Amino acid sequence: MSSRDKILKSINRHLVPAAPLPDMDQAWIQFDNPTEQFLTMLSAVGGRGEVVANLQAVSAKLHEEPFYDDAKQICSLVPNLDISADKQVDLNAIEDPHDLADIDFAIVPGEFAVAENGAIWVTDAQVKHKALYFIAQHVVIVVHASDILHNMHEAYPRTGLNTEAFQQTPHFGVFISGPSKTADIEQSLVIGAHGARSLRVFLVEESFDRAQFK
Amino acid sequence: MAGHAQLADKFVANEERAQWHDKSLWFVRHKRDNISHSIPEWETLRETASQVKLHTVAHLAQYLEEFETNAKKLGVTVHWASNAAEHNEIVLSILQEHNVKRVVKSKSMLTEECHLNPHLEAAGMEVVDTDLGERIVQLRKEPPSHIVLPAIHIKKEEVGEVFHEHLGTEAGASDPGYLTEAARQHLRENFLAADAGITGVNFGIASTGGIVVCTNEGNADLGTALPNLHIACMGIEKLIPSPDHLSLYTRLLARSATGQPITTYTSHFHGPKPGGEMHIVLVDNGRSDILGSDDFRRSLSCIRCGACMNTCPVYRRSGGHSYQSTVPGPIGSILGPSQNAKEHSSLPFACSLCGSCTDVCPVKIDLHHQLLTWRKEIYVRGLLPFSKTFPMKVMSKVFQRPGLYAFGGKVARKALRLMPRWMIYNPLNGWGRQRDLPEAPKESFRDLYKKRKK
Ligand code: SF4
């Protein structure tokens, strides 16, 4: 007998009392001001966030960032960001994700943000190499300001994980909440373990077409 | 094999360190309290999460088949392993088929439970654990002492020593920032050089065939986004019915574990990356037997948050290694004997029955009740050591004879007051170690009661 059949048989041998699936539609946490809550949580987990008027403002803000101007390789999936041509890396021209090892800055779109925990949902839908999210030294995520949800119970239906479309493509989605960190050495928190050393989030007020992102 | 108490002896011998360990974990428990109190519906969350787990376990075969079908649709190869040996063989053969030399692994208690690393290393592969805490214990050639905080028992000076030896950091360095930076460089090299990535699984989703892996460092992501081969090792109890139920566990896990609102990266893998290959190994290794037990079935709900360890007064003061079990602490003291009652017979006794673990458990496992049940079970199976059975036998004889009991009490009360200290506090009196006995009363309760009634 195959191990598969052995395991299933061993499980079915036992008569386990039935237990109904509980109702998931309950009074989950809501916030008076989800934007403010999101920004508070994001800074609590080591990230930085702010509301800006439009995509142009993102560009201006980034130039205030010291390591942005020092960066040698920037991979931006957000259009019109005033990045000098010799710095811009075209993700779609890269075949092997190992070639992303020296990316200093990744600027990527996020689908929505969650107020209760400062997390942002990103996928590989328009991103050829998901490695970009984790290998870049610094990550910037741009989210529409109206796409802030209260809690994870609102978030999961929005991910579309259960839909046919998600199962075709994309194959990967991640909630990112803050920069990479560890407290494995005597419980002292160190930001920048293996992944991004910093995470900056822009909540953009003016509506923009997500299809602009490539 | 030495029992928990003997192993804990070594740990408490260094009093300063034992206290430091206790404090570090209490700090984590405290963070958990703060953040759980910030969620008004915390108890509802726990109750709902517990019900979903009980439901899933009651329909496990059906959900496993659903999961398998959907995972296959996503292009994943699904394997089944009855036990640890089979799991190791499957993983090794996949790696060998792909000519893999170097593997990066992200924290997985299951591969630890199966002793995967030595198996792969014996076949000539290099396996690098990439969670920082795991890497530290791996370099020290010891097992993790905690499921979420594997290196919680190690001081920063000691990390400095290991890194000096293996990563060439400066001698005597102990700054966590400096050491983490060194580990970052070292591990990034390994991520870039790896031919395959192995991860554990926090949750498997039956309705989609996808899996979820939670880390703070992003190691599971770097380890699977670069190489083309991803092997995920998953205990069969990790299933949940649908993504909507994930909302419960992603809210509970990190808050219970470390007091964070959610892990930094909560990654949902649905099939291989473009051009890559993904395998999922479903492992039983004793789990389907636990499913058959009315007493211990609920232990299968565990989401491995570690909260029960952080709160346990015995764990905090005796250290994870004293449990000699992949999962230590309260939940480990239930799972250990379930896998091998003889080998782990002392673990259910490493418990003060204070019930604190049951109070913090996010999925409402009745931990201390199960521990008590295990004690009875271990007695019934004749696995109790003489030091515990002999006094019980004597006392049972005494309790059956009220006259003898009264006489004994009288002698003891006199003796405790009159005997010199060394006669009472000697190696034969385990209770007198580390604590003073209360002063013996002049009268017995029975005498007092008689007097009052008059
Ligand atoms: S038994 Fe409960 S508290 Fe302990 S690790 Fe498992 S889920 Fe967490």
Image: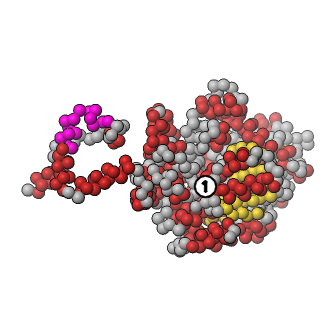
Q: Amino acid at mark 1?
A: Glu
Q: Nearer the viewer, residue A66 or B140?
A: B140
Q: Nearer the viewer, residue B144 or A97?
A: B144
Considering only vertical position in the picture, is A50 above or below B232?
Answer: above
Relative to B199, B10 lies left or right: left
Q: Quadrant of the C terminus of chain B?
A: bottom left
Q: Chain of mark 1?
A: A
Relative to B230, A155 lies left or right: left
Q: Residue at x 36, y 52 (%)?
A: B389
Q: Residue at x 30, y 36 (%)?
A: B425
Q: Secondary structure at mark 1?
A: loop
Q: Quadrant of residue B133?
A: top right
Residue receiving disc 1:
A116
What type of secondary structure mainly makes up the magenta span? helix
The residues colored magenta run B412-426
Q: Nearer the viewer, residue B66 or B41?
A: B66
Say if the magenta span includes residue B413: yes
- Colour scheme: secondary structure
Q: Nearer the viewer, residue A84 or B5?
A: B5
The spot of residue B213 in percent (x, y) is: 67, 55
The spot of residue B274 in percent (x, y) is: 83, 58
The spot of residue B103 in percent (x, y) is: 75, 47
Q: Residues within 10 Å of mark 1 (few under 14, many from 20)?
A: many
Say if the magenta span includes residue B322: no
Relative to A187, B22 lies left or right: left
Relative to B381, A209 lies left or right: right
The spot of residue A128 in percent (x, y) is: 84, 54
Q: Residue at x 28, y 52 (%)?
A: B394
Q: Residue at x 56, y 44 (%)?
A: B145
Considering only vertical position in the picture, is B15 above or below A182?
Answer: above
